[in-house]
């Protein structure tokens, strides 16, 4: 991780998939509209560009204002954050608020899960949901001034997802004593259930694994749209992620 430069957090950030200094590239259409019509930037003005893949650059708008030249790398974080969120699907658009909030944290991936109690209907298409969530992730990258874009994955079955990532420690946000150890590897998945929580079969399956731990969110009962943010905040407060 490279040190921060003066003014790193002061400027409006843009997104563009650039990789190196000296490169000349076009701002994505929405980014160009924001630069030219909202901020009324002009050719020669300097901007800050995150590529969402670990690097942030200082750049200068060129003559047409929709292209830019990369001047220098301001920061480089070679490894994405080790924290990932898995979330049971919620009814309607309720899933959008916790995902949008999670994307402002150093969370590298969000997994949407179909569980025994998740809210969905037969034949449901998730295409538009994913489009909205990925747009929110991109906005959060710039708003929170992050180097890594949070990736949003299509919904999948809970057990199939866990089997793919079984080697990664899992913090299960579920009532009960907190069993998360203080010493863990850098990678951690945090799992939050839908309204109604997890079924008994799901709890038996998850808690029967050696590297699954309970994550306590306190003595009060939280709504499913708030619990993911509380879980991430809890982990951040432990000083590891």
Image: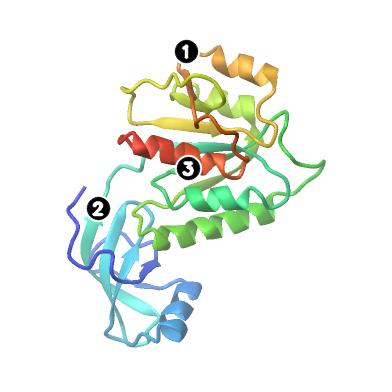
Q: Earlier in the sequence, mark 1 or mark 2?
A: 2
Look at the picture and state if 212 lies above or below 19.
above
Look at the picture and state if 228 lies above or below 39.
above
Q: Residue furthest right?
A: 122
Counting every numbered tag in the picture gives: 3
Q: Residue furthest front?
A: 219
* Mark 3 lies on residue: 109
Camera-side residue of 230 and 32: 230
| Rendered image: mark on residue 172 | none
Crowd tier of the residue under label 3, counting other residues whose Cα lies within 10 Å: few below 14, some 14–19, many 20 or above: many
Q: CA distance from mark 1 to mark 2?
A: 35 Å
Could you tell me which residue is drawn at 46 percent across and 85 percent down? 37
Q: Residue 10's spot in the image, x, y percent?
A: 28, 69
Could you tell me which residue is drawn at 76 percent across and 41 percent down? 120
Q: Residue 8's spot in the image, x, y percent?
A: 24, 64
Could you tell me which residue is drawn at 44 percent across and 53 percent down? 104
Q: CA distance from mark 3 to mark 2?
A: 19 Å
* Mark 1 lies on residue: 210
| Rendered image: mark on residue 76 | 2
Crowd tier of the residue under label 2, counting other residues whose Cα lies within 10 Å: few below 14, some 14–19, many 20 or above: some
């Amino acid at each position: 991780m490279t040190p921060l430069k003066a003014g790193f957090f002061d400027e409006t950030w843009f997104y563009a998939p650039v990789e190196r200094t000296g490169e000349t590239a076009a701002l994505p259409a929405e980014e160009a509209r924001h630069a030219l019509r909202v901020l009324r930037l002009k050719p020669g003005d300097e901007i800050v560009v995150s590529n969402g893949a670990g690097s942030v650059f200082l750049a200068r708008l060129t003559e047409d204002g929709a292209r830019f030249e990369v001047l220098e790398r301001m920061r480089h974080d070679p490894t994405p954050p080790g924290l990932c969120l898995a979330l049971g699907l919620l009814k309607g658009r309720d899933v959008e608020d916790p995902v949008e909030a999670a994307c402002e944290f150093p969370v590298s991936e969000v997994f949407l899960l179909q569980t025994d109690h998740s809210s969905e209907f037969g034949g449901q298409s998730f295409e538009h949901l994913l489009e909205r969530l990925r747009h929110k992730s991109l906005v959060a990258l710039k708003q929170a001034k992050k180097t890594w874009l949070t990736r949003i994955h299509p919904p999948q079955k809970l057990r199939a997802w866990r089997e793919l990532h079984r080697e990664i420690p899992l913090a299960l946000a579920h009532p009960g004593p907190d069993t998360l150890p203080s010493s863990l590897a850098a990678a951690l998945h945090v799992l939050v259930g839908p309204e109604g929580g997890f079924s008994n079969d799901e709890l038996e399956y998850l808690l029967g694994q050696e590297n699954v731990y309970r994550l306590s969110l306190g003595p009060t009962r939280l709504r499913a749209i708030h619990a993911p943010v509380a879980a991430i905040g809890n982990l951040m407060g432990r000083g590891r992620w």
